[in-house]
């Protein structure tokens, strides 16, 4: 495990040194600027050569200082992103959920897009949201990365795809320095105006220049006129025709004012395009480096036609006909150098006359839109591949920082999920209690009994979260885990919906109906040979909104439907009568969690839980004791 704290300390020290340098540069910029103003002022009033030299020297010194200061500030921005990235990695280890939610990467979780079925699963298992598996896993700073990772955590996959992802995750986990560089650059991109979502949207929009093509000949015309005027002014100066030189100066000023006005009032959309497509020369270079990070994936992936190979082909191919991301970004970098003239003090004095007399922005836009025309059909695919790469990078951080977790074993011909040392991945290591759990084979289910607060629901979520991790390609919080191809169906957190007039009981019935329908659909697909997946269901204290006898009948019926559809899963209850139901006893392997009641030093009863799973029906209940503990017992 990397020592993130020591790295943060080193970076913060370097950042303070740069901040000190930045403050010194600010002072010198002010000094040279004052020198420039004084030099210009006194040279105009006294026309003395020394003041002209002072003005010229101050201008040169000011520009040099500004250029060097810009370099320092760019380094400061990268170091700040570096420090924030390390703080996020450290907060993940500590399960510091508040810090993770406040971080700019954590805030991007609002961009997640899930189907209603995925939302229900995510809400039941804490897959997304605050204190969730996504929040623990995500280092994604771009919209495609955020959405891809969230989708992976909430979607079923076939074993070959999960194995391919996991092989890449393990490969990337052993490259901490490369991954850290990737996270920092992605954070820099994600916080800019040229984020991938805006870039893709721009690539689909019609070009701006064709309806305004007259600007190109106009720029050519004003450039030729300006050159002729300059030659005329030189000739007038040589021949002592001061009026001609003065009129030429007025003409140049007029052309410059007109073109700069065109730039201000007509080329506003062009500036917006530049902010998206090439927010800065550095952002284009950042994209190029992120795309090149696909080189860090396995060169010989487990499946030559799988997702890892696809990412490499999409982002790295040097074939001129491939229109790969790396090739496209190299071409865009050349255009960005042209468009970046106005973004730095060292080149702004060159940009100003080019824009004033030749409409330089229009020249850059023509090349930029030509680039877009060549690559627009590939751009969405580039960023989809970048999103997959960023998701793999995120999961690789979890793999690297969880050395005691294991790799899932996929058994495509089996129908049993077996966990050895199953733990809840969202809990800290020192708070995590593990259990050996087996769910399946088909024709059976796991019935988990126990009193309130004993750990039943936590066990369900532990199983579901680890299955989600396995399907996403991640490590699992177990000593060992084996599983068949599955799709999950859950009913754990259900609420009524007053806006739709749906009661709690009806909402739960709707959810259970969806789970059963899903299991039957998979059974039909298996019978047709189109899939080998089975449903893995997790049901927590279902159908509490009705009387005990009808509840037993209804629960047994739902479970029979699921088992008949070939589903496997677990259901929890603290209703001991339900656990004794003859229909359930035929299907279920029953286990339980329990509490221990011991007197404290003052003689009052103290309730504790060891969260260890045992065979058989729970021998204890605690509802009335909990009433007494909170002050609602009999007097």
Image (tube, rainbow, N blue to C red):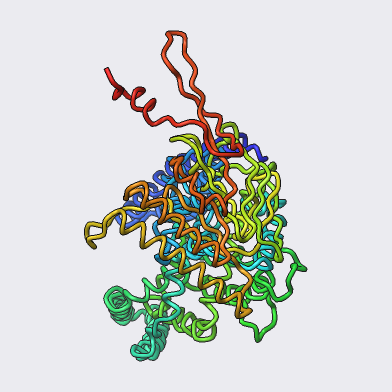
Comparing 225 with 327, the one in front is 327
Q: Quadrant of the N terminus?
A: top right
Q: Residue at x 50, y 53 (%)?
A: 134
Q: Quadrant of residue 317?
A: bottom right
Looking at the image, which residue is at 32% across and 53% down? 495
Q: Residue furthest right?
A: 300
Residues 94 and 582: in front is 582
Image quadrant in which the C terminus is located: top left
- From the viewer's perspective, tell me whether residue 521 is left or right of residue 170: left
Residue 291 vs 573, above or below: the answer is below
**Residue 384 appears in the figure:** yes
Reply above or below: 575 against 255. above
Is 10 displayed left or right of 274 in the figure? Answer: right
Q: Is residue 189 visible?
A: no
Most extreme residue toward the top is 602
150 left or right of 355?
Answer: right
Horizontal side, residue 188 vs residue 310: left or right? left
Q: Position of residue 563 (x, y in %)?
A: 55, 62
Q: Where does the image place residue 266, in percent across and percent down from the top left? A: 29, 79
The residue positioned 67% from the left and 73% from the top of the image is 316
Q: Residue at x 30, y 81 (%)?
A: 251
Q: Percent from the top left, x then y, of residue 499?
A: 22, 60
Q: Nearer the viewer, residue 4 or 137?
A: 137
Query: Is residue 218 positioned above or below 253 on the image?
Result: below
In the rendered image of this protein, does residue 624 appear above or below residue 340?
above
The location of residue 77, given as percent across then percent down, is 50, 49
Q: How many marks?
A: 0
């Amino acid at each position: 495990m990397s020592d993130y704290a020591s790295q943060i300390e080193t970076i913060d020290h370097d950042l303070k040194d740069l901040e000190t340098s930045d403050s010194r540069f600010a002072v010198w910029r002010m000094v040279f600027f004052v020198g420039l103003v004084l030099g210009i002022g006194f040279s105009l009033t006294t026309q003395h050569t020394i003041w002209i030299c002072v003005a010229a020297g101050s201008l040169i010194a000011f520009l040099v200082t500004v250029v060097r200061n810009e370099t320092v500030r760019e380094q400061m921005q990268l170091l700040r992103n570096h420090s924030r990235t390390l703080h996020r990695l450290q907060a993940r280890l500590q399960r510091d959920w508040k810090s993770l939610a406040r971080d700019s990467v954590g805030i991007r979780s609002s961009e997640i897009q899930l189907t209603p079925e995925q939302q229900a699963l995510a809400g039941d298992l804490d897959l997304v949201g605050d204190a969730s598996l996504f929040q623990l896993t995500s280092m994604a700073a771009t919209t495609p990365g955020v959405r891809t990772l969230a989708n992976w955590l909430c979607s079923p996959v076939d074993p070959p795809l999960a194995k391919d992802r996991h092989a890449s995750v393990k490969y990337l986990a052993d490259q901490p320095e490369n991954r850290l560089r990737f996270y920092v650059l992605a954070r820099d991109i994600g916080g800019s105006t040229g984020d991938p979502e805006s870039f893709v949207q721009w690539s689909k929009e019609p070009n701006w220049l064709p309806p305004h093509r007259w600007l190109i000949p106009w720029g050519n015309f004003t450039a030729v006129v300006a050159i002729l005027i300059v030659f005329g002014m030189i000739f007038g100066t040589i021949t002592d025709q001061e009026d001609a030189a003065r009129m030429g100066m007025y003409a140049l000023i007029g052309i410059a004012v007109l073109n700069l006005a065109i730039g201000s009032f007509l080329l506003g959309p062009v500036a917006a395009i530049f902010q998206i497509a090439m927010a800065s020369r550095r952002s284009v270079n950042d994209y190029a480096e992120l795309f090149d990070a696909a080189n860090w994936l396995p060169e010989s992936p487990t499946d030559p036609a799988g997702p890892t190979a696809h990412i490499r082909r999409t982002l790295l191919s040097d074939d001129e006909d491939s229109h790969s991301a790396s090739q496209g970004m190299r071409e865009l970098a050349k255009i960005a150098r042209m468009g970046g003239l106005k973004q730095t003090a060292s080149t702004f004095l060159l940009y100003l006359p080019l824009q004033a007399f030749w409409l330089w922005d229009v020249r850059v836009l023509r090349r930029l839109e030509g680039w877009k025309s060549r690559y627009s059909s590939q751009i969405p695919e580039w960023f989809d591949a970048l999103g997959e790469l960023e998701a793999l990078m995120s999961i690789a951080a979890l793999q690297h920082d969880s050395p005691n977790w294991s790799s899932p074993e996929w058994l495509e011909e089996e129908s049993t999920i077996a966990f050895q040392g199953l733990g809840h991945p969202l809990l800290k290591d020192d708070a995590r209690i593990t259990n050996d759990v087996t769910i399946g084979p088909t024709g059976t289910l796991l019935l988990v009994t126990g009193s309130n607060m004993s750990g039943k629901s936590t066990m369900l979520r532990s199983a579901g979260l680890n299955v989600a991790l396995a399907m996403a390609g991640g490590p699992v919080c177990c000593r060992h885990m084996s599983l068949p191809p599955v799709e999950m169906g859950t009913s754990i957190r259900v609420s009524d919906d007053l806006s739709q007039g749906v009661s709690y009981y009806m909402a739960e019935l709707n959810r259970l109906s969806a789970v059963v329908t899903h299991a039957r659909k998979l059974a039909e697909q298996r019978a047709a040979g189109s899939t080998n997946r089975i449903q893995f269901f997790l049901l927590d204290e279902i159908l509490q909104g009705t009387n005990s006898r009808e509840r037993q009948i209804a629960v047994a019926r739902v479970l029979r439907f699921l088992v008949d559809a070939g589903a496997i899963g677990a259901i929890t209850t603290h209703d001991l009568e339900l656990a004794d139901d003859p229909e359930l006893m035929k299907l279920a392997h029953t286990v339980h969690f329990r509490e221990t009641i011991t007197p404290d030093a003052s003689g009052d009863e103290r309730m504790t839980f060891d969260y260890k799973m045992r065979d058989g029906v729970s021998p204890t209940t605690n509802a009335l004791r909990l009433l007494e503990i909170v002050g609602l017992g009999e007097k």
